[in-house]
Amino acid sequence: MSVLKRKVIWFAFITAILIIAVFGIYQATHINKFHEVARTLQNLTVIKPKSQNATITHRYIGQVEAINQTDIVPYINGYITEITAQGGQAVRKGDVLAILKQDDYVAKLAAADAELFALKADFFNSKIKYERMKKSGENVYSPQELDDAKSAFLSAAGNLEQAQANRYAASINLDYTYLKAPFDGVLGNIAASIGEYVSPQSEKLMELVQYDPIRVVFSVTDKEFLNHFDKKDDKNLIMKVQLANGDILPQPGEIKYTANSIDKNTNSLAVYAEFSNPDNRLIPNAYVEVLLERRYKNVVLIDKSLLIMKTDGDYVYTVLNGVLNMHKLHIYGEDNNFIVAEDNFSPEEYIITETVENLLVGEEVPYEVINKTEQ
């Protein structure tokens, strides 16, 4: 056997002896530590998990938007003769906001009425004449005369329809001299003046914004969407908004729809909710805090200080049939200083309320149930 080979074997032998020695020292130390902990361990204080109902509030930043918002401009040309509204005024749909000079439009409607009256008479005369000639037949009138009478009747009918359309257009134009609110809302600043000539190409005369109902838009992640908004008519979800001064709007909101795709830039989904706003406390473009209150049934509230966070989940130490365990939690959220978790505890399982050594997991431990600190 060569010298090099003997050295390799000797080195491997020494290495194996060192590994065995280190392992033995570790085992002895670990066992000694366990026995030391076991000897000094007093009764652990434990509590019985109490199943109950809880509400978790999820908070989001939202922006208020008007459902309807429009600029008031005229449909026709004319001079403003009267402004019947004021800036900041709440108006109802159909309320008159301003009036344009009506003389020309009143005259055009009167002319249309006169034309319509005359053409109605012409129509009835030609109709009666044609029906009388057709009844008498070819024995009295020639085919050419009958054709001429029919042509006159049809022409009168066409003229009457045109006159009716002209009269309708004239009445609409007269009605357009009244600038009306297209929906309920609140007016902004009124930029128009009496005597000003305006047209459909003019700058806005005033702006109308709908306040009630009003929309609040906020964004959630795809996970939050699945947790909160994937169910229709969810009775366990209540939506509120908190105003800038801290007040909570008394009227709850209703989710109307969500965006049809995830925003690539923010990886979030826009949610559109509507709120009743009778006192105009929600103002368009303002920022508010959206409060989503979700009610959970059959859950357990656990003090945050008892939580053990690991890479594969969250745990608490428990005692089950006298043996110390690590119980994995299904957490829904937080409620002040407590974790809200699913009640998946066994009937004889207790939560340990103090710090213990992880090496005792799986070992029998002494414990004492206390009732005064039940969750």
Image: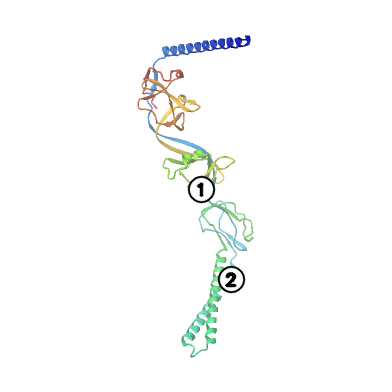
Q: Do the residues labelled 1 and 2 touch (CB within 8 Å)?
A: no
Quarter of the image for residue 192 reads bottom right
Give the residue displayed 57% in from the left and 12% down from the top.
12
In the image, residue 179 sits, relative to residue 39, either above or below, namely below
The amino acid at mark 1 is Ile
Q: Considering the numbered disc 1 on the image, is that residue within a helix, a strand or a loop?
A: strand
Q: Looking at the picture, how far across and down is residue 101, in whole percent? A: 60, 65
Cα distance, mark 1 to mark 2? 42 Å
Q: Which of marks 1 and 2 is nearer the N terminus?
A: 2
Asked whether, in this view, residue 49 is left or right of residue 277, the answer is left
- Which quadrant holds the N terminus? top right
Q: Looking at the picture, how far across and down is residue 349, in whole percent? A: 37, 25
In the image, farthest residue toward the bottom: 139
Q: Is residue 147 visible?
A: yes
Tell which of 79 and 264 is nearer to you.
264
Asked whether, in this view, residue 330 is left or right of residue 259, the answer is left
Q: Name the residue under label 1.
A: 214
Q: Nearer the viewer, mark 1 or mark 2?
A: 1
Tell which of 177 and 227 is nearer to you.
227
In the image, residue 190 sits, relative to residue 363, either above or below, namely below
In the image, residue 288 sits, relative to residue 304, either above or below, namely below
The amino acid at mark 2 is Lys
Bin the neighbour count of mark 2 within 10 Å (Cα to Cα): few under 14, some 14-19, many 20 and up: some
Quarter of the image for residue 173 reads bottom right
Q: Mark 2 points at which residue?
A: 108
Give the residue displayed 63% in from the left and 11% down from the top.
4
Q: Looking at the picture, how far across and down is residue 352, in whole percent? A: 41, 22
Q: Considering the numbered disc 2 on the image, is that residue within a helix, a strand or a loop?
A: helix
Tell which of 18 and 301 is nearer to you.
18
Bin the neighbour count of mark 1 within 10 Å (Cα to Cα): few under 14, some 14-19, many 20 and up: many
Q: Can residue 357 be seen in this view?
A: no
